[in-house]
Image (spheres, coloured by chain):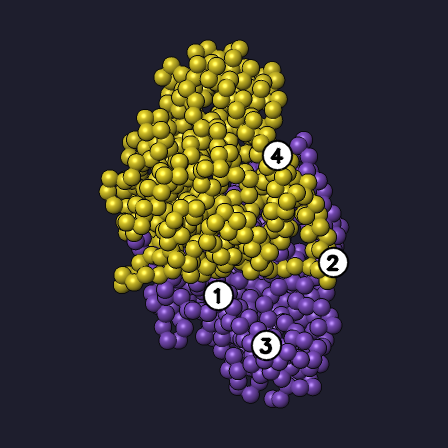
Chain colours: A yellow, B purple
Amino acid sequence: MPRINDHYLKLQAGYLFPEIGRRVKAFAAANPQTSGGIIKLGIGDVTEPLAPVVVEAMHLAIDELSKRETFRGYCDEQGYDFLRHAIAEHDFRARGCDIADDEVFVSDGSKCDTGNILDILAPGRENVIALTDPVYPVYVDTNVMGGHTGPRKDSGEYEGLVYLPMTAENQFCPPLPARKVDVIYLCFPNNPTGAVLPREELAKWVDYARANDALILFDAAYCAFITDPALSRSIYELPGARDVAIEFRSFSKTAGFTGTRCAYTVVPKSVTGLNASGEKVQLHKLWNRRHTTKFNGVAYVVQRAAEAVYSSEGQKQVQATIDFYMENARIIRQSLTALGMKVFGGEHAPYVWLQTPAGLKSWAFFDKLLNECHVVGTPGSGFGASGEGYFRISAFNSRANVEEAMQRMRDRLKI
Amino acid sequence: MPRINDHYLKLQAGYLFPEIGRRVKAFAAANPQTSGGIIKLGIGDVTEPLAPVVVEAMHLAIDELSKRETFRGYCDEQGYDFLRHAIAEHDFRARGCDIADDEVFVSDGSKCDTGNILDILAPGRENVIALTDPVYPVYVDTNVMGGHTGPRKDSGEYEGLVYLPMTAENQFCPPLPARKVDVIYLCFPNNPTGAVLPREELAKWVDYARANDALILFDAAYCAFITDPALSRSIYELPGARDVAIEFRSFSKTAGFTGTRCAYTVVPKSVTGLNASGEKVQLHKLWNRRHTTKFNGVAYVVQRAAEAVYSSEGQKQVQATIDFYMENARIIRQSLTALGMKVFGGEHAPYVWLQTPAGLKSWAFFDKLLNECHVVGTPGSGFGASGEGYFRISAFNSRANVEEAMQRMRDRLKI
């Protein structure tokens, strides 16, 4: 019988969102008459429809696929030139970042990419991996699956990973690691805390990576929510970053593609790793090999949809939706502050991160909010030990639902 | 600096299809006046448009995404219930196979799935892996990348893999392995040889797997091309298979989805592997964990497109296109036979596999066909050492192009 990958058995049984789903389902079953229904501000899923230009582009692309003369089969796995070019030009070169079209790899999701990137790095525990705490659970879980950690400790942390706490005490700026690390995950605007790094804080990380030959895996899935032009949207806005950083981007939150699936990863040709003989190898070459061997490209219809986001009309339309979500975030921040809660984030990110009132544990506050207000959020502890005592509220919902949720918290939450 | 995955450096530099693309591009550049153009019967990519019901379903789905009330964001990573149910019901239960809806995992491609499945098996060289020769290169390359092989030998084979030759001498029925193996890749109808296994031959493999506790990775991406009802489309039509086999299926060739991207993998709950303590673990559980952690589901529009394939109108429409390709295959078989060539396959698969005339090496025949006839095929040796002296011609093209290619071979090929 084949031997399985035992590293999977180290994983915690319930992934955060399935556990939330389970509790919500159980609550709904026990309370079928819940007045006004349950309002979900938990999982970070968009609620607004696709932009009209995106819809139009998809209809056109489908019509092309319906005729022999314009039919499209396999594309290059890395994506169509029209999309790679639009991305490199608009998201990078227009902002002064030196990124070439062929450094952009189009994919079906940043979740996939941030997991799959580990394929090209050494198996086992040769690299020391650092990540923030709290953190997007996928970074941790994929490292566990890949055998890059030891077993899970009682604290919920995995042996061998270097955790960088992000809490109110350090203004959600993770400290540089105390020991030398090889790979660092950074996600800004941050999921789950909604924090952003000032430019000089981000520069510290680029400098650290250059000085210590470390690789930064920069997840910028939420960069479209940045409202202050002084903040960097891409890590490549920092000098020297293209030698040490891979950046992940997604259309999921930018353009409401969570059910449409398109993302991309930037691997500059100047980023290198070491082979067993100590020679430098371009990570671009390895990722290209991985991407072409284990992936088959994104659907033509979806790539045309993504391209439409970059049209001038598309930019206006997606910006209007982002502004809408950010107004939700403002309402949430204001309402919770008025309730006497301590809130963070929500200014350059669609997530508000609150300190749970009365010293409640994160899951206790989750249950309380669900039971008393029929509102679902995400317990901070689900994102890591340092998330304990915090709670994430997502701004992705209709205005009516956000206002109703805030009203219920004002009226019914017993703190 | 991070250490890279050195296993990638064992890989042969040029993947088969990029090398074909390079040679065709060079030929076209040197011969800009090529009369009538180059006809590509190389890569197995479909050419006919999407079925009308599929097109209609996609338009409808996009309209849903354009309105707030019917918008869809994230779906369960495993796929929408409507599609998992349609697949299990139509492709399996209707044919007497005991497969439950939740044993079906919808994905964006069989190439991805056949590569990613290795994630849940032991890293390194704990499992002995068998595959046919010739073989779809992705099986080999992903095993190399995963460190499941030794270095590449001069023969092009990788140390540690067990190769099962499929040639005219054994009627393209691979022999049972001489040594005990843990994992076996089987692809029938076969890419590249176009061969199918008679039911009793397939039964031998199921029996072998049961007797030797081996896992069969069964790639049935071409099963829709089977014309003889006595042949098995699914390995689960064989008694006992659901304890030992994982099956991969794709809409790429069945419904022309190479540019639309939808596939699925069946992992029965009864298939197990061993953990380090020698206990059995459900592979279903591990794959579910992998799929939900490292994948984000297939686009809603695409899942609706796949669902439409199962409507009665959809079945008729995709069958008509398959019949069209199979008539191409018949023409190719007949034409090449009339030229005195020895041909195989093409009766239950869209690929014709010919023995190169005059003992030519596969790449020599490739160059000859390109130079003399401006026709592109695929050298058999690109699929493995036992493919040397063979050549694959794909039936995926317009009738006019297939007829023209055959005419050119009759008129111009100097054998």
Kind of residue at disc 3 = Ala
The residue at which mark 1 appears reads as B137
Residue B111 appears left or right of B337: left
- Per the image, label 2 sits on a secondary structure element best described as loop
Residue A106 in view of the camera: no
Question: What is the x, y in percent for residue B286?
Answer: 43, 44
- Establish whether labels 2 and 3 are both on one chain: no
The residue at which mark 3 appears reads as B29
Query: Mark 2 to mark 3: distance in Å?
Result: 29 Å
Nearer to the camera, B414 or A112: A112
Residue B184 occupies quadrant? bottom left
Kind of residue at disc 1 = Pro
Kind of residue at disc 2 = Lys
Residue A190 appears left or right of B233: left
Query: Mark 3 to mark 4: distance in Å?
Result: 48 Å
Tell me the residue at 67%/71% (across/down).
B329
Quadrant showing the C terminus of chain A: top left
